[in-house]
Image: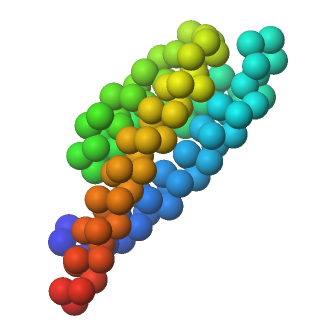
Amino acid sequence: MEDEYLTLIDVFLKDSDLRMALFRQASRTMTFDRPSLNMGELGLAAHSFKGSSSNMGAVLLSELCLRLEEQARREQPEGLEQLIALIDEEYQSIRQLFEAERQTLMAQT
């Protein structure tokens, strides 16, 4: 796994950036009467992000994604904007840590 760790970080960050873009779009355009994004799609994206975050050791991010997944499953748009903001904040912290780790590993090669 050591040889593939940089690739794993790159894939995680790329996929996570796409998921966060989807979450941000949902947050900006979500309305109570007509959500812009199918709640099922939002729940699936949250489920996927939860798993990859957990696999990478980002426990709090994974827990926040679980909350989003459950809320989307219940089709409750109330509070989604705030929850997505918390996920975004935590992801940015995780992203910085992985970017620093990536730089350290690349300098060693």
Q: Quadrant of the N terminus?
A: bottom left
Q: On the picture, is 44 further left or further right than 66?
A: right
Q: On the picture, is 31 further left or further right than 7?
A: right
> Is 42 placed above or below 93 here?
above
Q: Position of residue 2 (x, y in %)?
A: 18, 72
Most foreground residue, 33 or 14: 33
Q: Position of residue 31 (x, y in %)?
A: 76, 19
> Is 18 placed above or below 27 here?
below
Q: Quadrant of the C terminus?
A: bottom left
Q: Can residue 100 be seen by looking at this rendering?
A: yes
Q: Position of residue 21 (x, y in %)?
A: 62, 48
> Is 97 placed above or below 28 here?
below
User: How many numbered discs, if any?
Assistant: 0
Residue under the point 72% across and 25% down? 30
Residue under the point 23% across and 78% down? 105
Q: On the picture, is 61 further left or further right than 69?
A: left
Specify the color scheme.
Answer: rainbow
Q: Position of residue 60 (x, y in %)?
A: 29, 34
Q: Quadrant of residue 64?
A: top left
Residue lying farthest to the bottom in this orientation: 109
